[in-house]
Image (cartoon, rainbow, N blue to C red):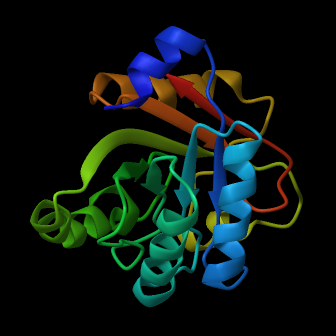
Amino acid sequence: MFIKPLVQAEGVLHFTLIDPDQQSPQKAAEIAASAEIYGSDGIMIGGSTARYDDTNKTVAAIKKSCKRPTILFPANAEGISKHADYIFWMMLMNSQNRKFLVGEQMKAAPYVKQLGIKTIPMGYIVVSTSARPTTVERIGNVDKILPEDIDKVTAYALTAQYYGMECVYLEAGSHGGFTLSLYY
């Protein structure tokens, strides 16, 4: 995996997240090219409602304009592309829905294996920062974690680590205010 050696060498990495639902594949390719120029170490592609066709076209366009590794950040099994280098093999740790703990992963696993996409096991934790639930909070049916719930988020992160996940991704969802990724 490319992350561990880069973290050891650089100490910190920057990934740019591009949601295939938010712009055309050509515009996504322009964003990725700019991110590469400004030093982004990788391009993440995914979103709460991204589907196969949009994801596949977006990754293909990005690969033509950018040399950085492409990493799928899928909300479900439809967020996969044959053009991607890696996939964050995620478990939405604080989901109360089996679908996001193992269901979508089980549907995607044979396809990921067939395509030979390298997996990066990741615990994904959503923290609530606003009165209105974000899209990921609603779709993922999350066990609510408030920013001051340090013990709760730590317990979820440790659970991810003990399951063997290589990194943890904390976020507040779209327009939620923050994103933080941790690497073990």
Asked if residue 3 lies left or right of residue 144, the reply is left
Left or right for 157, reference 16: left
Image quarter for residue 52? bottom left
Q: Quick one: which residue is furthest to the bottom in this view?
A: 53
- Percent of width and height locating residue 155: 50, 25
x and y percentages locating residue 86 in the rendered image: 35, 51
- At a point 33% along the width and 74% down the height, the residue shown is 77
Q: Residue at x 41, y 65 (%)?
A: 97
Relative depth, front residue between 23 and 29: 29
Q: Is residue 93 left or right of residue 109?
A: right
65, above or below 21, in the image = above
In this view of the protein, can residue 184 be seen by the observer? no
State the residue at coordinates (88%, 55%).
130
Q: Position of residue 103 (x, y in %)?
A: 27, 67
The residue at 17%/71% (across/down) is: 111
Above or below, 41 against 172 in this view is: above
What is the number of callouts on the image?
0
Tell me the quadrant of the picture where the C terminus can be found: top left
Is 93 located above or below residue 28 in the figure?
A: above
Q: Position of residue 84 (x, y in %)?
A: 37, 62
Query: Can I make out residue 75 in this image?
Result: yes
Question: Is 151 situated above or below 64?
Answer: above
Quarter-of-image position of residue 135: bottom right
Seen in the image, is 6 located left or right of residue 100? Answer: right
Q: Quadrant of the N terminus?
A: top left
Q: Return the residue nearer the eye: 4 or 175.
A: 4
Q: Residue 28: which quarter of the image?
A: bottom right
